[in-house]
Amino acid sequence: MDLPTYETLALDAPEPHVLVVRLNRPQVSNALNTQMGRDLHALWSWLIAEPGEVRCVVFTAAGEKAFCGGGDLKERNGMTDAAWRHQHEIFERAYWTMLDCPIPIVAAVTGHAYAGGLEMVLASDFAYGVAAARFALTEVTIGIMPGAGGTQTLPRIVGERRAKEIILTGTPFTAADALDWGILNRVFDTREALHDAAMETARRIAANAPLSVRQAKRSMHYGLQMDIRTALRFEIECYNQLVGTEDRREGIASFNEKRRPVFKGR
C-alpha cells in the first residue's frame, strides 16, 4: 500500500486493510501545532476521498509519555488574536474531517490525553487505553474553552452533568474513570497489550464487509442526531444501498458454501 507522508504523523500498514497512524512529536508530548493540524486534516481528507484498501485505522502516538498533551502552547505564545483564530480554523477543519471519516477509527491511547488530545480520543469511533493514562479538558484553566468538539462530543458520551463537571473544573481523571464513564472501551496494563488488542479489533473490523461497516457507522453517527422515526428511515436508506453489492452476494454465498467470505468492497 502506497502511503502519504506527513511531517508530524507516522503511518504504517502492518497488515492488509489496517492503517496505523501515530502522532509523531514525542519530544513535546505530541502537542498539537499548526503543522499537525494541517497534517491531520490532509490525512482524514485522504481517507474520505481515496481510502483504497484501508478498512480500519488504529490511531495512536509515538513515545512513552503522552498520547497528546493538547495544543502547543509554546507555539501559541505571543500569537496575535488574528493568528490564533487562523490556527484554530485549521484545527477545527482537522477535527470535523475526522468526525466525517467513513473508515472506523480505533484510538489506542498510550499515555496522557489532555485538552485537544482528549478531543481526538472523543472524535474516534471508540478507544482503548493504558491504565496509567490520565485525561482532562483543561482549557478553562488557561482562559479558553474546548473548541475542537469537546463540549459536544463529551456530553454525548458521558452525559451532560458529568461533562459539565469535567469541563468546568478542568480536573484530570484516570483511565479507570474513563472506562467507567464510557470514554474508553477497555483498559490494559501495558502498551504492548494495548497495541495487540487494538490491532486484533482492527483486524476483525477489516475482515468484515467494508461497505457494510461504513454504512453502519454512517447510520449510527448521523442517526443519533435525528429524531427516532427519521433515524429509522435513514437506517433503511443506508441498508438498502448494500442490497445490490457484490459483497452482499458473496456473504450469502460463503455462508451457504461453508467458507470464509472474500469481500472486495464492491
Image (cartoon, rainbow, N blue to C red):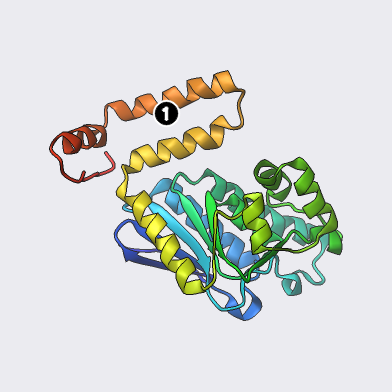
Pick the front one: 252 or 116: 252
Is residue 34 at least partly visible in the picture?
Answer: yes
Q: Can residue 54 be seen in the rendering of this structure?
A: no
- Residue at the spot 20% in from the left edge and 46% down from the top edge: 260
Quadrant location of residue 76?
bottom right
Residue 183: percent from left, percent from top: 62, 53
Q: Quadrant of the C terminus?
A: top left
Going by the numbered disc 1, the residue's amino acid type is: Cys
Residue at the disc numbered 1: 238
* Image coords of residue 176 (percent x, y): 65, 61
* Location of residue 257 (image quadrant): top left
Q: Residue at x 60, y 67 (%)?
A: 35
What percent of the width, then of the height, locates residue 181? 66, 51
Q: Residues within 10 Å of mark 1 (few under 14, many from 20)?
A: some
Q: Is residue 160 left or right of residue 198?
A: right
Q: Secondary structure beneath disc 1?
A: helix
Q: Is residue 228 above or below residue 103?
A: above
The residue nearer to you, when weighing 43 against 207, is: 207
Residue 170, percent from left and from top? 81, 59
Q: Count the numbered circles shown.
A: 1
